[in-house]
Amino acid sequence: MIHFGFSYIGFIWLFMLFVPNIIWTKNKPKDYEKYVTKENKILQILERIGEIAVCCCVLIFSDFNIKEISLWSIWLLLSFVLMVLYEIYWLRYFKSNQTMQDFYSSICKIPVAGSTLPVCAFFLLGLYGVNFPLMLSTIILGIGHIGIHRNHQKEVSEKKKASIFRGIWKGIGIIILGIFLLISTGIVGLKNITYLSCCIHTSNGIDEQSYVMLGGQEQYLHIRGEDVHNPVIIWLHGGPAGPDGYFTYTFSNYLVDEYTFVCWDQRGCGRTYFRNQTIDPDNDKVSFEQAQIDLDELVDYLCTHFKTKKVIIMGHSYGTLLGSQYSINHPEKVSAYIGVGQMVNIECDIYSYEDALAAAKENKEDVSSMVEAYETYISKPTLMNMLNLRSYVSPYHVAKKEANALWLALRSPYMGINDFRWFTKQLGSLDDYISLNSQLFQYIQTVDVRDYGLEYQMPVGFISGAKDWTTPVKYTEDYFHAITAPKKNLQLLEDCGHQPQYDSPAEFSEILREMLDEYVK
């Protein structure tokens, strides 16, 4: 989106647009000029502005060129189909008597096909390229161009009394179309604005999305930074299987001037899952042990790629388990370890329950359902029972600052179709989602991070939301005091919950930078 460069697709679309129009100048319908004199001046101005803007946009932005084939490519295919219909419309016209009725005929029940088809095709092309300038230009063109020729069609056509039902369906169709145009253009506009704030501006910088072979599978990476010589941070997302790389821009924008920030969709989730779905559809090759192997290969790849000896490991929630063990086991490759919402063990849910229960009793509320959920969890400590218990406990631990993940995702310029597919998978059947990564979920039910060892050979920093009850601060503090490290630091963000990096990104990033300035610079 908003990538300057020549678009061969845009050139082809313009070629398909202009050739029949050039031929048409010698084959205009009889009396056409008589209707031209009656055209609305405002619509004429919008038409001219739209024509110039559309022609410029499709040539100067490279966003419309064919990229990786995915479900999103359907917009490009539909755009091409409309352009093919446009060519068929012209062939039919040139073979006709070339009257005004022929000129304003429909095709596949698409009215005023000669103007409607190309406008819709270019709008879908803009949607495919997630390019707001083209979409807006096409809307302006459509208002003017379709408006003019729709008025001509009304003048030419015989007036017929339309049925009430046809009028209702037509109105509904217009409303649906209007909503689609408004929502799609608005979302793309937001993504473009966010992207402009995320742009890497230096010639020595990097903004790269790619797949790298790790542990026998191609795994997705997104790497951003203003200088490839800066220290490398590997972000380990939580979950398990909760990739968030497409909205880490929220806080990484504050870091990319001094660090090269690497997001990784771990094995079995997100883009990595869909990339390997045919060879491992049930995630049989997903495990915590395999994740350690994948991470080690990732570290080696990045050290080679960026010519460095060590990287900074930063994990969130479940990612802190992955990061803690790796940092303790591979001190020669890690310059600093940062735990965000450091996970210790699953007993923290009992601690959260006891606090919520006390608050509920103090308010003289009925706690029978909460107690029942707790007793069920204690007798059968499964993940589903734990999540059910959390549903009763969470309302008593609401943070004042809480980011809206859906809003961050909609605004994200990096959210692709496979990110959206995984996002919806998380919102779908919880049983199916958990079973897909059952080994990881079973692992977190029994693990205690202290079993990895308590001695870090690199500086360690912990950042938590003061209102984090998913990985409660008490447990993080106890772990912090138990470990040894050359340097260690624990910082809390007031009013933030389990995701301080999204709840208060500027404050989070400032704390992180201060830690890393002391640790690695």
Image (spheres, rainbow, N blue to C red):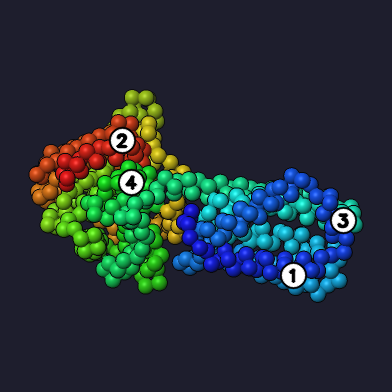
Residue 404 as seen in the image, left or right of residue 445 = right
Q: Residues within 10 Å of mark 4 (few under 14, many from 20)?
A: many
Query: Between marks 1 and 2, how big is the CA–CA gap?
Result: 62 Å
Task: Give the mark nearest the N terminus, 3 or 4.
Answer: 3
Query: Between marks 2 and 4, how big is the CA–CA gap?
Result: 12 Å
Q: Are marks 3 and 2 in contact (CB under 8 Å)?
A: no
Q: Are marks 4 and 1 in contact (CB under 8 Å)?
A: no
Q: Residues within 10 Å of mark 2 (few under 14, many from 20)?
A: some
Q: Measuring 36% from the left and 48% from the top, which residue is drawn there?
A: 248
The amino acid marked with disc number 1 is Ile
Using the image, tell me which numbered label, if any, was put on residue 252: 4
Query: Between marks 3 and 1, how big is the CA–CA gap?
Result: 20 Å
Q: Where is mark 2, residue-wise?
A: 507
Q: Measuring 33% from the left and 37% from the top, which residue is drawn there?
A: 506
Q: Where is mark 3, residue-wise?
A: 34
Give the quadrant of residue 512: top left
Residue 427 position within the rendered picture, expressed as x and y whole percent measured from the top left:
45, 51
Task: Give the mark nearest the N terminus, 2 or 4.
Answer: 4
Using the image, tell me which numbered label, if any, was put on residue 23: 1
Residue 166 as seen in the image, left or right of residue 352 = right
Element on which disc 2 rests? helix
